[in-house]
Amino acid sequence: MRYRTLGRTGLKVSELGLGTIKIDSPAVVQHAMDLGVNYFDTAACYQGGKSEEKLGRALKGRREQAVVATKWHTDGSTSAKELLASLEASLRRLQMEHVDLIQIHGATNSAQVQSDELWEAFSQAKKAGKVRFHGLSSHGNQAEVVREAIKSTRYDAVLVSYNALLAERVGPAVAEAQAANVGVIAMKALQPAHRSRESNAFKGLRGNPYQQSIQWLLKDRNVSTTIVDMPTFDEVDEDVAAVKMYEQANLTEFERAVASLSLGTCHLCGSCTAQCPRGVQVADIMRCDLYRTGYQDRARATDAYRALPVGGSAASCGDCEQCGVVCPWGVPIRERLVSTHEALV
Amino acid sequence: MMSGSGYRSLCVAALSVLLLWLLGAGACASVPPGQLLPTDHISGWVLRETPRTYTPESLYEYIDGNADLFLSYGFQSAAVGDYVPSDASEAWVTVDVYDMGAALQAFGVYRAERPTDVTPLSLGTEGYSSEGMLAFWQGPYYVKILLIEGDVEEAARRLAEIVADRIEDAASMPPELKLLPTEHRVPHSERYLKTSALGHRFLNEVVTADYKLAAGKAALYLSNQAVPEAAAQALAKLRQFESDSGADITEISAAGEEGFAAGDPYYGNVVAVRLGQFIALAVGEKTPFEDLTALANTTVESVPDEREKEC
């Protein structure tokens, strides 16, 4: 197992980390540690708190060898008192005196990232020796959230969904984080491999798409570690094997397969701008769809859609016999406009 | 020693449970979870807005990465209602109704999330209150009520009761649990693991419970592999895993068709016994092998054996 530095924390973290959403067997955690995994990610809400309990039991006697990250929730106005209470509960469940990294869980907006109450809570916890570093996780609106985190200078690390499918959308922000010495932890590394199960794009691919998904990620030196949910011994072994071979892995076929998966996916290239003769604001609606389905930020998608000018929405899309808007990436424009309209109105 | 007629009755009961498990025990034709949410004025509380609904693809929007746990237990759909006082005072309760597709799966995710320290509640098939929330399960539904803001315990309880009343499915424990011996079983330790018990990809469809034996603690896992050939392969893989780990393996004479005992480097003492499509595993860090063997044997004796013509 090799190790990278997690940004300005200075922590040496294994290139493969363990996600604990589905953790059940402490033995699997110990097996991962035996193979060199030292980064463990959990959260107060995983399995109603039992993920932290199980991780704590698994790491008993080996705490010093592990880098442990957990999470707390803020909506931007959550008080420092509530946050500190959440941290105390996490430490109790983990049976630890401190965690190495405390992260906002699922940050999507500036209010969360810039919260002074959050910073106050972190500062107090750090002073008390209960946390060492400050971070955030983000599923939606990630690029913007990462840039906010960099700008604030309060964040030592960010946890984002990042993989071969998200390279264009999230890659630039990941590079900016690394340049600002903010550590990057990647999740959802296996998303391309999961997509391969229902797509012909990976037909004939030589090798294991799960391993290649991890290898693709680790070839990006802007990433410090990737956390993967590995609830079985087999999955630990398979993923550790992938890490051992990534430098020499030839991923040309894999990348070609991922590119063809991207067909039918909006790249926000803007080619559809002003193509509709009726004035439907196609590019803006595609962005709303991205907020909803890609960033999983329904609130933002709804707000943006409702802010479209009269005549700009897809309300009248059914009136045209045939849609004249052509997308170079093969996105079925009318179908996507109608589904977005139905979802957000 | 059980009498012939007593054994026959046990076989019939066990076969019934087996049939239910094979057919997807509790796989209910469920109503959409949104229809279980109260929509009328409820004792001074109203819905803040139209309930939100989530599918397997969109559940992440609501519960982030925790969605993976629900998906692993067969999540179908969810509806979420936010309730506020009709007098606009500052208080808020959120009701989550998850359709897990089958009673066993609802039980599974309920027990997976149930914190260690809770106050039991008479709600649904099983329920509890914990800091800031209530939860219960019934039929294929898993319901969580989150006390978001204000002094809302009474309102939360009322909402939970309304939802429970609307669920038409029987409030009964999954029949699969009947295959686990009751003697020495630790109350409320039963769980259902849909996949990957003990960290092994091949140990699926598992009911498990903890036991307090005279000689020590044990955890029992009963895996239904659907057909005997799959169970034989799974046992072989387990034996290989133990061997590769450097464990000493001893073949044991089991009530089933085959079995072994091993000193597992992670779990301590492990006994595995197979009968037909079932594998029973008894695990105890320092519990003597003979006690674990007795527990595993007792378990397989209660499952139907296709070799028994009388059954």
Image (cartoon, coloured by chain):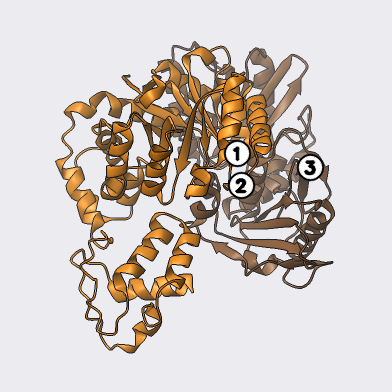
Chain colours: A orange, B brown
Tell me whether the residue at label 1 lies in contact with that at label 2, contact meaning CB atoms closer than 8 angstroms. Answer: yes
Residue B137, image x, y percentages:
71, 52
Determine crowd level at label 1: few under 14, some 14-19, many 20+ residues with C-alpha closer than 10 A: some
Up/down of A227 relative to B20, above or below: above
Q: Amino acid at mark 3?
A: Ser
- Same subunit, labels 1 and 2: the answer reads yes
At label 1, the amino acid type is Glu
Mark 1 — residue?
Answer: A117
Which residue is rendered at x = 44% and y = 24% of the image?
A39
Circle 2 is placed at which residue position? A77
| Kind of residue at disc 2 | Ser
A313 up-or-down from A286: above or below:
below
Q: Distance of mark 2 from mark 3, alpha carbons? A: 67 Å
Which badge, 1 or 2, comes first in the chain's sequence? 2
| Residue A261 image point, x, y percent | 25, 55
B51 relative position to B157: left or right = left
Label at residue B5: 3
